[in-house]
Image (tube, grey):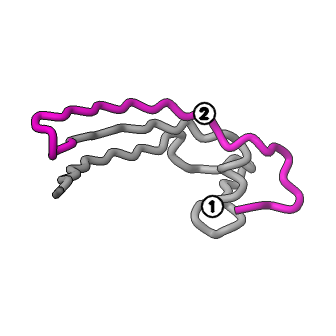
């Protein structure tokens, strides 16, 4: 997303964790977790898209953190 008159372009900071394990030559298992600390720019985009609202004092109410986790299994067949 983009906001034309945004006061801050910073979307936030992200930390990622990844774990891979190969128990057999044909099987890869992986999982990961990402934590995003939202910046002012991301909050303004959410406001422009109607996903959050502005309070009477002008502040934007939104969770300051975004989470994402995944698990993946890859089976290689010769």
- Percent coordinates x, y for residue 33 in the rendering: 36, 38
The residue at 17%/56% (across/down) is 78
21 in magenta:
yes
Q: Would you say 11 lies left or right of 16 here?
A: right
Give residue 13's mark: 2
Q: Earlier in the sequence, mark 2 or mark 1?
A: 2
The residue at 26%/40% (across/down) is 30
Question: Mark 2–mark 1 contact, CB under 8 Å?
Answer: no
The residue at 60%/41% (across/down) is 38
Q: Would you say 32 lies left or right of 62 here?
A: left
- Percent coordinates x, y for residue 6 in the rendering: 84, 53
Q: Which residue is situated farthest in the right direction here? A: 5
Span colored in magenta: 1-28
11 in magenta:
yes
**Res. 14 image quadrant:** top right
Q: Which residue is situated farthest in the left direction here? A: 24
Give residue 53's mark: 1
């Amino acid at each position: 997303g983009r906001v034309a008159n945004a006061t801050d372009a910073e979307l936030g900071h992200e930390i990622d964790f990844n774990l891979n394990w190969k128990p057999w030559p044909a099987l890869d298992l992986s999982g990961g977790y990402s934590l995003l600390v939202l910046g002012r720019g991301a909050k303004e985009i959410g406001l422009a898209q109607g996903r959050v609202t502005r309070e009477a004092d002008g502040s934007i109410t939104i969770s300051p953190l975004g989470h994402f986790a995944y698990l993946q299994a890859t089976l290689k067949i010769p």
